[in-house]
Image (spheres, rainbow, N blue to C red):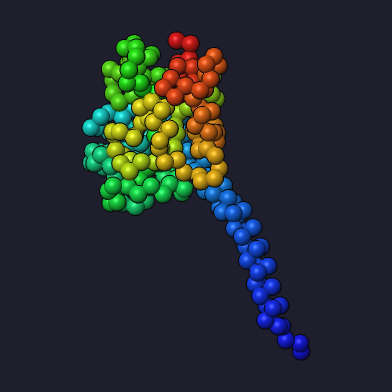
Amino acid sequence: MKKFSLIELLVVVAIIGILSSLLLPTLGKAREKAKTAVCKSNMKQISIAIFMYNDDNDGYYPISQDGGWSWSDNISPYDGRNLTEDQKDQNGLTGDNSGIYKCPSDEVQRTDTTKQARTYALNLGRIVWGSTNWRGYCRGITSWGIGEMPSKGSSKSSEINNASEVIAMAESPEVGDYVGNSWGPESLTWQGQQYTVQIPHKGLNGSNYLMVDGSVQHLSFYATTTTPSSGFALHQIANTMWDAHKGE
C-alpha cells in the first residue's frame, strides 16, 4: 500500500482548512436563522396570549403599573403560567426558565442572574418632550398606568388602523429586564431606545418585531422609524411604525 508523503498530507490538511473557513460562516448564519425562527415563534405565542387578554378586557392592551404588575404578569392566565398574586408581586420572577419570553439569541448578561431574563418589550411609544396631549405623549399600544392614556391606560385594538404596519412588541434585551418586572425596559419609552439597545441576531441585519395583527416581521431599526413625508426620524414617533394612532 502506498503511503502518503508529508507534502500530500499537508495539502490535504490545507484543503480541509480552506473548506472549513468557507463553511463555518454559512453554518453560523444557519444557526442564527434557526434561533430567529424560534424567536418569531415565541413572539407569536405571546401575541396569542395578548389577543385573548384583549378579548376579555374590552379590546384594551395590558399595561405595566409602575411598581405593580407588569404586562407579562397580566397575560399569565393566557400563556399557560397562571401566576399567583404573590408571584406577580415579585416584580421579577426568580429562576432560570424564561420560556417564551427570552429569545435564544439573547446573550445580554443580566444584572441579577437569579431572575428570569426577558427579551421582549411592548411598544409604549412614549416621548419625553413635545406635546402634552396624550396622542403625542403615548402613541404606542400601552402605558405605565391609567392617566397616561384615556380610559384604561392603553390602546384599544379595534381603534388601531393598519394593524400590519404598527409595532406591538420588539426585541429589547437589556441588563435590567426580567420576566415580571414593571419598570424601565419592560416597555419601550420611545423608538429611539432601540438605536443603542443590544439587538440579537448577529449578521442578519435587523431584529424581529411583532405587529398588532399578530404577524412577525424581521426589520432593520431604520425601516421602523421612517415616515412617508420626512424619511428617517430618530426622535419622531408620529406616523412611524411605532405610532398606533397615525393621523390623530
Q: Identify the residue at image location x=54%, y=28%.
A: 223
Residue 56 vs 129, above or below: the answer is: below
Q: Position of residue 183 (x, y in %)?
A: 28, 33
Residue closest to the far right: 1
Could you tell me if residue 61 is visible in this image? no
Task: Give the quadrant of the N terminus.
Answer: bottom right
Task: Give the quadrant of the C terminus.
Answer: top left
Residue closest to the far front: 7
Q: Position of residue 55 (x, y in %)?
A: 43, 25
Q: Identify the residue at image location x=66%, y=75%.
A: 10
Q: Identify the residue at image location x=41%, y=28%.
A: 192
Q: Is residue 30 left or right of residue 59?
A: right
Q: Position of residue 134 (x, y in %)?
A: 34, 14
- The front one of 124 and 7 is 7
Q: Position of residue 49 (x, y in %)?
A: 43, 35
- The front one of 246 and 141 is 246
Residue 46 position by quadrant? top left
Q: Is residue 7 left or right of residue 218?
A: right
Residue 22 vs 167, above or below: the answer is: below
Residue 3 vs 162, above or below: the answer is: below
